[in-house]
Amino acid sequence: MKKLILVISLVIFAMMLSAQELSIKNPVNVTDDVRLELIESNDYSTLIKYQKISEEGEVSQEGILFNGKPDGVWKMYGINGAITTVIFKNGDKVSLEAVIDGRKTKVFYVNNKPSKSIAYFD
């Protein structure tokens, strides 16, 4: 679980660095494994769609950056079809849901730190 949280944190940091290159004249930025698309930008907010692309050319992670911070539902797609879902609010984690060792696990966060975990069979 700690490795998963570390990976998510590193990916988010990389997203924020890449997001600074977008503009109205250049709304899409594609690197080797990340695609960023400017959805909306005004005086008050910026929305960017983030997609991480696997070596096979498939989306392995996606979500929305609101003013440079993850916001809303983020999904990570595993090799075996497993989906890990992380919900963010203004850059802070609210919850994480994943299948670990055959059990569905949900972690709730308070102040961006795990506060409660529930594991159950679906």
Image (cartoon, rainbow, N blue to C red):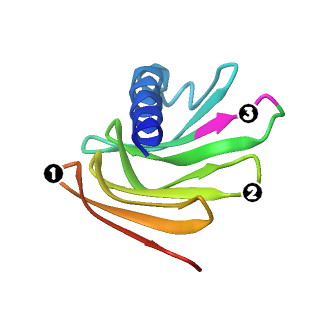
What segment is highlighted magenta in the picture?
A: 51-55
Q: Quadrant of residue 103?
A: bottom right
Amino acid type for the residue under numbered disc 1? Asn
Relative depth, front residue between 109 and 16: 109
Amino acid type for the residue under numbered disc 2? Gly
Relative depth, front residue between 122 and 65: 122
The residue that mark 2 highlights is 81
Separation of marks 1 and 3 at Cα, in angstroms: 31 Å
| Residue 56 x %, y % | 84, 33
| Residue 3 x %, y % | 45, 36
Q: Quadrant of residue 6?
A: top left
Q: Is label 2 or label 3 in front?
A: 2
Q: Earlier in the sequence, mark 2 or mark 3?
A: 3
Question: Does 66 appear in magenta?
Answer: no
> Where residue 54 is drawn, which disc sits there?
3
- Residue drawn at x 34%, y 35% is 68
Return the residue found at the far left: 111
Circle 2 crowding by C-alpha within 10 Å: few under 14, some 14–19, many from 20: few
In terms of secondary structure, where does tag 3 sit?
A: loop
Separation of marks 2 and 3 at Cα, in angstroms: 13 Å
| Residue 23 x %, y % | 47, 27
Q: Is residue 75 left or right of residue 92?
A: right
In terms of secondary structure, where does tag 2 sit?
A: loop
The residue that mark 1 highlights is 111
Q: Quadrant of residue 81?
A: bottom right
